[in-house]
Image (cartoon, helix red, strand yellow):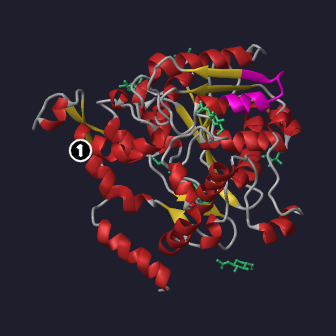
Amino acid sequence: MSSQRFIGFTITMLICFANYTVLVRVCKNNLDYYIIGDKECYDNPDTNLNVTEILRYRWNCTAEEYNITTDDGYQILVIRAYQNISNPIPIILGHGIIMNTLGFLSLYTHSLAYHIIKSGRQIFFVNYRGTRYSLGHTGNITEHDYDYWKFSFHEMAIYDTPKILELVKNMTNRKSIMISYSLSSTATLAYATLYPEDTSSKLIGIITMGTAVFFQNSTSSLKFFAKISSTLAFGLKLIYNGKLFPRDEMMPVLKFAAQGPLQYLTLMAGFSAIVGTDPASIAPEYFPVVVINTPDCLGQNVALHYAQVFNTGKFRQFDYGSAENTVKYGAAEPPEYDLSKISVPVAQILGKGDILTTVEDALTVASQLNSKINCGVTVLKYEKWTHDDFVDSKFQEKYLVPEVLKHIESMESGRC
Ligand SMILES: *[C@@H]1O[C@H](CO)[C@@H](O)[C@H](O)[C@H]1NC(C)=O
Ligand SMILES: *[C@@H]1O[C@H](CO)[C@@H](O)[C@H](O)[C@H]1NC(C)=O
Ligand SMILES: *[C@@H]1O[C@H](CO)[C@@H](O)[C@H](O)[C@H]1NC(C)=O
Ligand SMILES: *[C@@H]1O[C@H](CO)[C@@H](O)[C@H](O)[C@H]1NC(C)=O
Ligand SMILES: *[C@@H]1O[C@H](CO)[C@@H](O)[C@H](O)[C@H]1NC(C)=O
Ligand SMILES: *[C@@H]1O[C@H](CO)[C@@H](O)[C@H](O)[C@H]1NC(C)=O
Ligand SMILES: *[C@@H]1O[C@H](CO)[C@@H](O)[C@H](O)[C@H]1NC(C)=O
């Protein structure tokens, strides 16, 4: 065992001694969590089901799995889910960092995705490389090799995205509408700047939720971590070998937070400094599912690439250092993603309480788009809407669902 594996192993042994079959007890109201034997509580099966099983057995959808291989050998899982399709234009839903498709399914029938399916549409759920269902590789590398994790959001943009769009086009013979949350907005917009023709042939438009392109106005604590990222990266590589926040190692903490709203708030206190604070949005009956099912690991270079965007204020390709940049890019500095090249309508949805991806930074994105395809920035009419509220807020049905459906309908009818 090499020394780095040994350190990783030791840390695992120190913090991870629980078993991982999780069936969480959920309660209708916050107080019920602290009353033993409360009749308003029950075991929610969602934490024991995989993504396809939830779609099939809990949402009563037809769900099909497509395990596709990117041109650089990563095997990623796309899931198609639908009930009765009355509007055949496919919707593609892309997730954020430290999550996968499961994170969109936590609120049962109150989830945004459920409402999109109920509206008579089909969703293709994306799982980007390096997440729980997309860890395969056709080559000689596995998730346990540092080489596996040598990708940033750039590879999600140039390899994962076009392959997913090709699959959807193949399956449906139609152009899609891409709904991209956070990381997915980064990857999708980067792809759209690099391949405008391919984009126009596959997409009707892009709807972003929490546009993660510029962070100049972000007051997130990630700003601080970005500054010390190269130092952090050195230590984290030794411990985790490229795969940050492995799910198994986080599980004891997540299980603690699933026990009750006070425990959950304790965990969220740290998270709030990254994404914003909105305790009122916690869904009493579903937060244990959110906290057990949502978190996934993060590739170290994805984090580093974001740190570079934070530190430079530039939306550009990965900075390998001037020597390697010169070999790779023919210039000492990495090339920027030129937002003015995007060829399809882009509508952005933002939250006022989101301190990570802010309304001001979304306006900067909008100002750089070709005005013909700029569909503007919609600010949700809920003052404290945070970055994570896009996936876990109990107010999704009231504020987010109508806006998303409105944008989908608008793009379907050829408008912005
Ligand atoms: C989920 O479980 C079912 C069996 O119930 C299996 O067929 C399917 O491949 C699993 N999907 C994933 C993504 O693990
Ligand atoms: C799915 O079908 C089962 C069995 O018919 C039913 O009990 C359940 O309420 C349905 N779920 C939803 C979300 O419609
Ligand atoms: C779908 O349509 C069929 C036939 O029209 C109907 O029997 C079924 O209940 C519908 N399913 C849903 C989930 O709406
Ligand atoms: C996808 O296919 C590869 C190769 O057959 C396999 O290793 C991997 O587990 C599959 N992934 C899923 C989610 O089915
Ligand atoms: C995989 O194969 C390549 C080329 O044969 C080699 O350079 C690399 O070291 C191998 N990686 C691992 C993790 O074995
Ligand atoms: C799409 O269809 C083409 C032509 O049949 C095929 O070559 C390609 O592999 C398919 N791509 C995907 C991602 O299914
Ligand atoms: C956003 O950031 C820019 C660049 O740092 C700055 O000029 C501007 O004043 C900031 N706006 C707000 C509202 O913070």
Q: Helix or strand or loop: what does disc 1 sit on?
A: loop
Please identify the residue farthest to the left as the structure is shown: 36
Start-end of magenta stretch: 363-375
The residue type indicated by label 1 comes to: Gln
Residue 366 in magenta stretch? yes
Name which residue lies at 50% across and 43% down. Answer: 220
Viewer-nearest residue: 291 or 24: 291
**Picture layout, residue 34 above or below residue 298:** above
Percent position of residue 413, x then y: 75, 13
Left or right of residue 22: residue 407 = right
Q: Is residue 12 visible?
A: yes
The residue lying toward the viewer, choosing from 85 and 31, is 31
Residue 204 in sight? no
Residue on which the image places disc 1: 259
Residue 291 in the image: above or below residue 175: below
Residue at screen point 65% across, 23% down:
377
Q: Please identify the quadrant where the C terminus is shown.
A: top right
Residue 122 part of the magenta-drawn span: no
For the residue carrying disc 1, how many other residues have a C-alpha within 10 Å: few (<14), some (14-19), or many (20+)?
some
- Residue 138 lies, with reference to residue 152, above or below; the image says below
Residue 360 relative to residue 11: left or right: right
